[in-house]
Amino acid sequence: MKSIDLEIDKALIAVGKKNIEALMPAARNGLEMLHKGTGKGNDFLGWLHLPSSITEAELAEIEKTAAKLRRCKAVVVIGIGGSYLGTKAVVEALNNSFDWLQKKRSNPVLLYAGHNIGEDYLTELSAALGESKFGIINISKSGTTTEPAIAFRVLKKLLEKNIGKEAAKDYIVAVTDKSRGALRTLADKEGYKTFVIPDNVGGRFSVLTPVGLLPIAVAGIDIRALVKGAVDMEKATNEKVVIDKNPAAIYAATRNALYQSGKKIEILANFHPKMHFIGEWWKQLYGESEGKDSKGIFPASVDFTTDLHSMGQWIQQGERIIFETVISVEKPDTKLTVPTDKADLDGLNYLAGKRIDEVNKMAELGTLLAHVDGGVPNIKISIPALNPYYIGQLFYFFEKACGISGYVLGVNPFDQPGVEDYKKNMFALLNKPGYEKASEAIRQRIKN
């Protein structure tokens, strides 16, 4: 099998090759810190050898549970952040974009909840589920995170109302901590099927645990091919690979060299509409891993050519503090050509007979040339095809590069202390037990 390919030549308009080479020792050190477990956050390195450690028994159990949930017309995945973004990224990238319109389906519709606190959203979701039997995959290490906990309360009550409390137990799966937490306690009490979120794997690195693999399998996607791609990329980026041949290290060094040159924003761009949520997953991975200690590249994402008609102007001629990383899919799954039109009122007959993807590739190349000419450094990641194997490669590549990059930057890539700040304020404003003093202080602050 081929591998995804990394090109950095077009990044050299902002930094010289020597600048990138100067950071390769730091990248090598970051790679060694990951593999030796000597860096900050080393208690969250369970993802590092996760692909190669997944057993046949684990995959078989996930597939067995997924087959049972596929008896439902809809399955709701409850989770926030890494507990749902990886799943949505893979499912949206690999399933038919209009699958939900098909009258005859082999797999249930995957729906999502617990990633917001939207009253209208939950009301509309409940109405859409109606009186039907549906599945629930509740993903939470603690079981007390506000957004998913609210969603689970609402949807558990609805499912029990629809099919009865005893029957509902067969269609609720908890993906949670091995031995503690509110969701683990409830699951054991009610007898829900459970899968474990490893203690040493953070949410944004969890797509290759049951957090992602179970709902991805429910969607009918080959999780074995996904894992195989990740295993091969694990090998291609391990500590034994010569550092200047290690794509994760090269990407980490290049983006840090660009950051040091004044490029503060990285835009992840794609030219394939099915890759939108890969950008959303990537934003969380890098934003949560690197944005701390008043440091970090700001991660943004765009869908081209769509966003060329909105953000394109800013990218082309705005402040020169950006660089692009473009994910390019080499071959589409299908074939469709531009038809001939006798009247040719739109003037497109010069494209007649050409594949739609050929037009898209020329848009991609034209954009690359324009943006480089406009002073936007460009990194390109080429994927041979959009399938589970290469998505598995891509996800592990980004995870490995993220760990290395965080260490090059000098931060702990595996914590997220800033995430808790809004929660403390929210709990105080809601008068959560135990927050009495904070409630009084924050209300006085608002009053003043």
Image (spheres, helix red, strand yellow):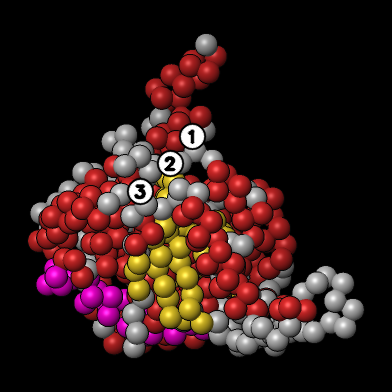
Q: Amino acid at mark 1?
A: Met
Sequence-first tag of 2 and 3: 3
Q: Quadrant of residue 140?
A: bottom left
Sequence-first tag of 3 and 1: 3
Q: Say whether residue 229 is magenta.
A: yes
Percent x, y for residue 364? 54, 67
Dot 2: what SS?
loop
Q: Residue 317: tell me if it is visible.
A: yes
Stretch in magenta: 220-242
Left/right placement of residue 175 relative to residue 347 reads left
CA neighbours of label 2 inside 10 A, class few (<14), some (14 to 19), many (20+): some
Disc number for residue 321: 2
Residue that numbered label 3 is attached to: 14
Whether residues under marks 2 and 3 lie with C-beta atoms below 8 angstroms apart, the answer is: no
Q: Nearer the viewer, residue 249 or 145?
A: 249
- For discs 2 and 1, the disc positioned in front in the rendered view: 2
Percent x, y for residue 175? 39, 67
Q: Amino acid at mark 2?
A: Ile
Residue that numbered label 1 is attached to: 426
Mark 2–mark 3 Cα distance, whole angstroms, equals: 10 Å
Q: Nearer the viewer, residue 303 or 40?
A: 303
CA neighbours of label 1 inside 10 A, class few (<14), some (14 to 19), many (20+): some
Whether residues under marks 3 and 1 lie with C-beta atoms below 8 angstroms apart, the answer is: no
What residue is shown at x 38% (from left), y 85% (from top)? 225
